[in-house]
Amino acid sequence: MKIVVCIKQVPDTKGGVQFNPDGTLNRGAMLAIMNPDDKAGLEAALRLKDKYEAEVTVLTMGLPKANDILVEAMAMGADKAILLTDRVLGGADTWATSTSLAGAIRNLEYDLIITGRQAIDGDTAQVGPQISEHLGIPVISYAEKLEIDGGSVVVNRQYEDRHHVIKAKMPCLITALAELNEPRYMTPGGIFDAYDAEIITYGRVDLIDVDDADLGLKGSPTKIAKASDKVRKGSGEQVNLDAEASVGYILEKLTEKHII
Amino acid sequence: MSQTVNLEEYKGVFVFAQQVDNKINGVSLELLGKAKDLAKDLNTDVTAVLIGSEVKDLIKKLAAYGADRIIVVDDPELKEYKTEPYTHALASVINEYKPEIVLVGATAIGRDLGPTVSARVKTGLTADCTQLDIGDFPLVKLADKEQKRNQLLMTRPAFGGNTIATIACPDNRPQMATVRPGVMQKIEKIENPQAKIIEFNPGFAKNDKYVDILDIVKSILDTVDIMDAKILVSGGRGLGGPENFHVLEELAAVLGGEVSCSRAVVDAGWKPKDLQVGQTGKTVRPNVYIAIGISGAIQHVAGMEEADVIFAINKDETAPIFEVADYGIVGDYKKIVPMLTERLKSAAAAEA
C-alpha cells in the first residue's frame, strides 16, 4: 500500500503568540512547526506502515525552509519526502494550492492520501477536499478513526452530534483530526538517518496537468481586499475589591444594564 | 484562474439549506437573514437550496425565514449527508441557475461540501466568515486597475483569531463563503410567507466517488445549546476541578442562563465538547457572558467577544480576559460567586 501525506509548516499560534510593541503580530518570533492535524495524519500513515508495510511519502508546498518539517517527518519514519517549492506558486489561495498539490501528486502512485483537516494559520479546512476533487477520488473529511479493510478504508467521520462509519474504496483521500491519535516522537536513529536522507524537490515543471493560469496569486480566485491584525475592543473597567464589594459591584452593573 | 464565464449572467443570492434528519440547521436560517440584506443591496432575491430525501415539509420554514424561492433537490440517494451526491446536487444547481453568491454554514457538513463544490464549479471559497458586505474591490480605486462594484466582501479571522482579513472573489462566479454559525441574525418569522418552489433533480448515477455509510452513531448530548443562551456563565481551568462547576450552575440557574466552558476544561475532561466556547468550539453572542477562572486565550476570546456585556472574574489581575471584559473583577470566584447567587436569590424572593 502506498500513502501520500500532505503536511504544512505553520507558525505555532497555540499559546506562543508574540506581538510587536505596536500590537501587530511578530511572525518571525513564532516557532515554525508541523501543523498538528497534519502530524496526526502522518502518524496514522506510519501506523499503517507498521501494520501493513505501507510506503509513506510526505509532501509539502512552501518556502525552502519547509524542508525542516520534511526532515522531521523522515525522522518519525516516513520513507520519502517531497518539497514543492517555486516562486510562481507564492500567494496561492486554497484553490490554487490544492491545484498545485494535485499536480504534484499526479507523479506518484497512491492508494491513500491523508491531509490534516485544517492548518492552524488559515483554519480553512478546504485544501484536502479540493485536492480530492481535482484528482477525482472520494474524500472523507474529519476522520477520527481509520482502519483498512481489504481494498477499502473504514473511517469514523465526525460531525457535531454524531459520527458516521464510512467505507470507501481506495484510492481515496481522508482529512485527519488531531484527535485521531497521539503522534510519535522522532527516534534518535531516525533523526540521524533523516539528515542523510534525500529530500526530493519539485518545481513548476514537475506539476502534471496544471495550467500556468491556475498557479499562485494570479491563479487564485479569492483576493485579499484588506488584512490587519485584529483590533480588539478596548478593555472596560477593572476593579480589585473584597468579595462583598465585588458582589455589590456586579449587582450594580447587572441592574444598570437591565439584566436583572 | 481559467474559468471563463460571463459574470453578468450570474444573479441572486443562494443559501444552502442544511438539513439533517429532516431538521433545518439554525445557521441556514441565519444565512437567509443575511442573504436578505445582501439581496437588497444587489436588488435581487434570495433562493434557498434544499437538498435531502423527503424534505418537502421544510419548505414552509425556509420561506418563513426569508427565502423568496426554494430549489428542492429531493432524492433517496440524499437521505444522509454524503460528500459526492450532495456535491453533485449543489454544483448542478449552481451550473443550472447561476447564482452570484452562494452561502453555506461553516458546519462539519458545510466545511466539506463548500470546498468540493467550489473546486467542481471552479470558483473561490472563503471559509468561516464572520461578516459579509457588498462593496467595491479593490476597496480604493487604483490608477492601473479596474474597480469592480457590488462585490461580496467576506471577512474572516485567521491565525487562530489573531488577524482578520477581508476577501473578494472578483473574477469568478459564484462568490462562495462558508459562514460561522451564531454570527448572523435570523429575520423575524414571516406569517403566511409566499415563495416560489422549483423541483430539480440532476440524476444520481453511482460512481467510484460514492461511499457507504456502515453505521450512524449519535452522541448523547446535553439538550441545551449554548449558542441559544441569552446568558452564559462560563468556567475555565481556574475553577480548579470539575466538582466546582456547581457554583456556576447555581448562578446560571438563578439568572436563567446556561453554563459553558473554555477549551482547557474540555481537554481536561471536566465538561463535554459541546459546551466549549472558542475558535475550535462554538461562537456565542449572548446578552451577558460571565467568564470565571478563564484566562482569556485568544482562541477563547474569538468565540465570545461579540457578547453584548462581558464580565470576568479572575484571581490574576493580568489575565488577558480583562482586556475584552466590560467589567473585570479581580478576586476569588469561590467567595464572590456563591455570595452573588445568594443575593440574586433573595432579591428574586423579595419580588415574588
Image (cartoon, coloured by chain):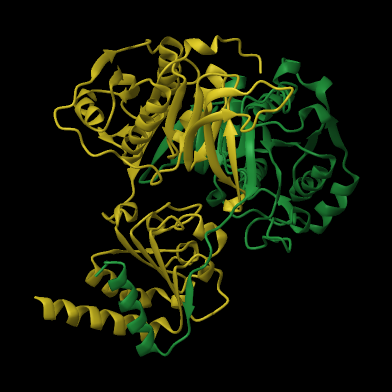
Chain colours: A green, B yellow
Q: Nearer the viewer, residue B108 or B256?
A: B256
Relative to B105, does residue B83 appear above or below in the rendering?
above
Looking at the image, residue B55 lies above or below residue B323: above
Image quarter (top left, top right, bottom left or bottom right) of the N terminus of chain B: top right
Q: Residue furthest left?
A: B352
> Can residue B257 be spotted in the picture?
yes
Is residue B59 positioned above or below B243 on the image?
above
Q: Is residue B38 left or right of residue B3?
A: left
Of residue A223 and residue B273, the one placed in the foreground of this image is A223
Q: Position of residue B342 (x, y in %)?
A: 24, 83
Q: Quadrant of residue B57?
A: top left
A143 or B18, which is in the foreground? B18
Q: Which percent across, then down, holds residue B138?
A: 63, 29
Specify whether residue A171 is in view: no
Q: At which x and y percent is residue B193?
A: 18, 26
Q: Position of residue A120 (x, y in %)?
A: 62, 48
State the residue in front, B107 or B187. B187
Residue at 83 percent of width and 20 percent of height: A205
Where residue A3 sits, quadrant-wise, is: top right
> In the rendered view, does B187 fall on the left or right side of A2?
left
Image check: A259 left or right of B104? left
